[in-house]
Image: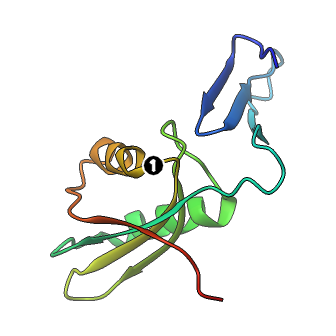
Amino acid sequence: MSLPPDVVTAGGEARLTTIPRDKTGLSFTVNVSLRPEGDEVPRFMDFHDDLKLPQEAVEQIAQGARDGATDEFGVRQVELYHNADGKVYCLLDGPDEESIRRHHAALNVPCGEVHRVDSLL
């Protein structure tokens, strides 16, 4: 499949950001799956100790998860678990462990162990 030059691909996803030429200032992003039907994205969980996130960061991550946003590494935040002690667990979809590590590095968040996980349900 041939994609236009303004399409960014990562982890089997294509992202096309269009900025209209009128004065509205509106833009939108279209995510299109390039994966064959039934081709599941691997899921990972990682742990961060003593990572105290400001409330606005938690809200931004939560909104990204609700929107199904995928970053330039093909990583999508599925869920974020945290407590007042600063312990944070991230549940993420992504192509591989290295992509998960790059996702965290881009956010300047230290990333320890990363585990591939599968649902039991």
Q: Residue furthest top?
A: 5
Which quarter of the image is occupied by the C terminus? Answer: bottom right
What x and y, as percent, mark residue 81? Answer: 41, 81
Instruction: From this view, report whether residue 83 is shown above or below residue 29.
Output: below
What x and y, as percent, mark residue 50? Answer: 15, 75
What x and y, as percent, mark residue 87? Answer: 24, 81
Instruction: From this view, report whether residue 21 is shown above or below residue 39.
Output: above
What x and y, as percent, mark residue 94? Answer: 52, 52
Whether residue 35 sits left or right of residue 93 in the image: it is: right
Instruction: From this view, report whether residue 102 is shown above or below residue 115.
Output: above
Considering depth in this image, is 75 or 59 the residue closer to the camera? 75
- Residue type of the residue flagged with mark 1: Asp
Which quarter of the image is occupied by the N terminus? Answer: top right
Helix, strand or loop for disc 1: loop
Whether residue 82 sits left or right of residue 66 in the image: it is: left
Considering depth in this image, is 6 or 39 the residue closer to the camera? 39
Q: Residue at x 59, y 47 (%)?
A: 70
Q: Quadrant of residue 116?
A: bottom left
Q: Which residue is mark 1?
A: 96
Q: Residue at x 39, y 63 (%)?
A: 57
